[in-house]
Image (cartoon, rainbow, N blue to C red):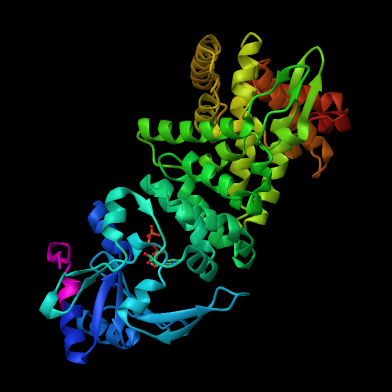
């Protein structure tokens, strides 16, 4: 029996071990913590499984370390935070599940029974916290060897494990993606058989797993697996619809599913390269940037395939996709929507001669998200033809330079109209009305077009001009008129 007490240096383990001995129960640390010790991955959660009451042991330990204990009686668990770690206690369980729900019927069990009902062999390993064999590895399903060989395998027949908690099918994909592991064929087959079971899952739990896949180093791995197994079709059919190439008159179009995944990987690589923190929502934008393509696909004998306005249609699809995954319909969604809607703009700019006014408009529309948009846009260059890539990259560079130049001159990024509604009302002596919006819009357009500079004096002149056109007169003038 191999002993790994070197991994149990955190002071909580000794305290738990003593308390368990005093209560006369056996306990172990299990799951992600053990796996991550061997992988050398940082881990902030410690799961303790007790052959007895998890809540009772947690109560004794939390008192000793003076931590605030949160008890979840329904689940038979309790947790507290201590010295940078979240420590969760649970009684060893043997479970059976109702087919129509993922809430288990729980009965007390032994460590071995508890290990059987876990998701993967690599997540079912435990270290003993008994004084007599402190740190001994308990690994009945060969988790250690699967870890070494990079294998995702269920401890029981995969049909049982996945049917017990269908989220595990997506977790298998998630771990394969995060760790660069391979899901064993019988498990993949089982997932294909059990995709129907996804229906009992809450969409939020699916979205959480998707976020972890998106945030990994090579997210495409996960999405190919989700597609292959039929999982993706179940909760993101709009993405599956990107698959395939249609041919007419011998002409085919780009395979949009693999293109999308390449763009996603490119974004991940660029974030890493630039030393940026991973931005989940930028990754969502990459995943959804071409989602409007199937609905806009057209074939013309002369021009070939086109996806006209797929940016616009794609942006319109974003709220529905967020809703179906129960993701927040807040500013994050709006950000994704904005990036999807604007993703063609930077490169389109260089097809014409880059005018300052076009650059100003892009800066205005993208605002502070312009840098993220440029990452997405650069990531979107995936052609296999070297000359196309070279041309696009050169154009991209040009637009970037132009953006910096115009922003330095005109400060459009955080555009604030030099003329506000208050001023218009006061100047013309008018109540809130439609004319105010028209005047402000006129001034804004003039700045974006470059007809005037972005400053108060020039904007003021234009306000007067537009006001006169609308039949308004400055208050002082009207008073003069009244006097004469
Ligand atoms: N587990 C399981 N089935 C699930 C979820 C979790 O069997 N659907 C078990 C696994 O043994 C897992 C442990 O509960 O290791 C803890 O789950 P969780 O904290 O969700 O995952 P971790 O393995 O810790 O990994 P991560 O922190 O990356 O989510």
The image quadrant that residue 294 belongs to is: top right
The magenta segment is 1-14
The image quadrant that residue 217 belongs to is: top left
Horizontally, residue 479 falls left or right of residue 340, namely right
- Is residue 411 among what the camera can see? yes
Residue at 28% across, 57% down? 36
Q: Does the magenta stretch include residue 479?
A: no
Q: Quadrant of the C terminus?
A: top right
Quadrant of ligand 1 in image = bottom left
Q: Where is residue 334 in the image (x, y as percent from the top left)?
A: 63, 45
Q: In which quarter of the image is the N terminus?
A: bottom left
Q: Nearer the viewer, residue 187 or 208?
A: 187
Q: Position of residue 58 (x, y in %)?
A: 29, 82
Q: Position of residue 398 (x, y in %)?
A: 52, 13
Residue at 15% across, 64% down? 4
Horizontally, residue 111 falls left or right of residue 198, namely left
Horizontally, residue 282 falls left or right of residue 236, namely left
Residue at 36% across, 51% down? 151
The image quadrant that residue 290 belongs to is: top right
- Would you place residue 73 above or below residue 287 in this image? below
Q: How many labels does the image show?
A: 0
Q: Which of 216 and 320 is in front in this view?
A: 216
Horizontally, residue 220 falls left or right of residue 125, namely right
Residue at 58% across, 45% down? 227
Q: Which of 139 and 453 is in front in this view?
A: 139
Residue lying furthest bottom in this view? Answer: 23
- Would you place residue 90 above or below residue 217 in this image? below
- Is residue 428 among what the camera can see? no
């Amino acid at each position: 029996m191999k002993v790994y007490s070197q991994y149990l240096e955190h002071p909580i383990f000794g305290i738990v071990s003593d308390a368990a001995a005093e209560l006369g129960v056996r306990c172990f640390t299990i799951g992600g913590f053990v796996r991550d010790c061997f992988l050398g991955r940082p881990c902030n959660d410690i799961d303790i499984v007790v052959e007895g009451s998890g809540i009772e042991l947690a109560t004794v330990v939390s008192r000793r370390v003076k931590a605030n204990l949160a008890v979840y009686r329904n689940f038979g668990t309790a947790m507290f935070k201590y010295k940078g770690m979240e420590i969760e206690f649970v009684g060893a369980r043997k479970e059976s599940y109702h087919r129509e729900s993922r809430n288990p019927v729980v009965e007390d069990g032994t460590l071995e029974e508890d290990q059987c009902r876990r998701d993967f062999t690599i997540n079912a390993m435990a270290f003993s916290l008994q004084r007599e064999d402190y740190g001994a590895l308990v690994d009945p399903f060969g988790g250690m060897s699967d870890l070494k060989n990079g294998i995702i395998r269920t401890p029981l027949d995969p049909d049982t494990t996945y049917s017990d908690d269908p989220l595990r099918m997506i977790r298998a994909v998630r771990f394969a993606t995060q760790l660069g592991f391979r899901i064993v064929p019988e498990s993949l087959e089982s997932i294909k058989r059990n995709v129907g079971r996804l229906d009992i899952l809450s969409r939020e739990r699916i979205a959480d797993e998707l976020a972890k896949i998106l945030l990994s180093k090579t997210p495409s791995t996960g999405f190919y697996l989700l597609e292959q197994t039929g999982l993706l079709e179940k909760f993101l059919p709009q993405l599956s619809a990107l698959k395939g190439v249609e041919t007419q008159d011998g002409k085919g179009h780009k395979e949009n599913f693999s293109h999308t995944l390449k763009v996603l990987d490119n974004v991940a690589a660029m974030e890493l390269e630039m030393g940026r923190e991973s931005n989940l929502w930028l990754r969502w934008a990459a995943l959804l940037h071409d989602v409007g393509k199937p609905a806009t696909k057209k074939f013309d004998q002369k021009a070939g395939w086109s996806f006209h306005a797929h940016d616009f249609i794609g942006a319109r699809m974003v709220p529905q996709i967020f809703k179906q995954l129960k993701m927040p319909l807040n500013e994050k969604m709006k950000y994704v929507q904005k990036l999807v809607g604007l993703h063609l703009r930077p490169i389109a700019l260089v097809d014409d001669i880059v005018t300052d006014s076009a650059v100003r408009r892009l800066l205005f529309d993208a605002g502070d998200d312009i840098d993220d948009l440029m990452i997405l846009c650069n990531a979107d260059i995936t052609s296999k033809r070297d000359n196309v890539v070279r041309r696009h990259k050169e154009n991209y560079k040009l637009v970037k330079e132009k953006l910096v130049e115009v922003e330095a001159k005109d400060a459009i990024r955080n555009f604030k109209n030099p003329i506000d509604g208050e001023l218009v009302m006061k100047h013309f002596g008018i109540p809130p009305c439609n004319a105010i919006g028209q005047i402000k819009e006129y001034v804004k357009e003039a700045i974006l077009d470059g007809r005037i500079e972005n400053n108060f004096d020039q904007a003021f002149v234009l306000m007067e001009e537009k006001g006169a056109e609308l039949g308004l007169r400055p208050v002082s003038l009207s008073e003069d008129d009244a006097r004469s």
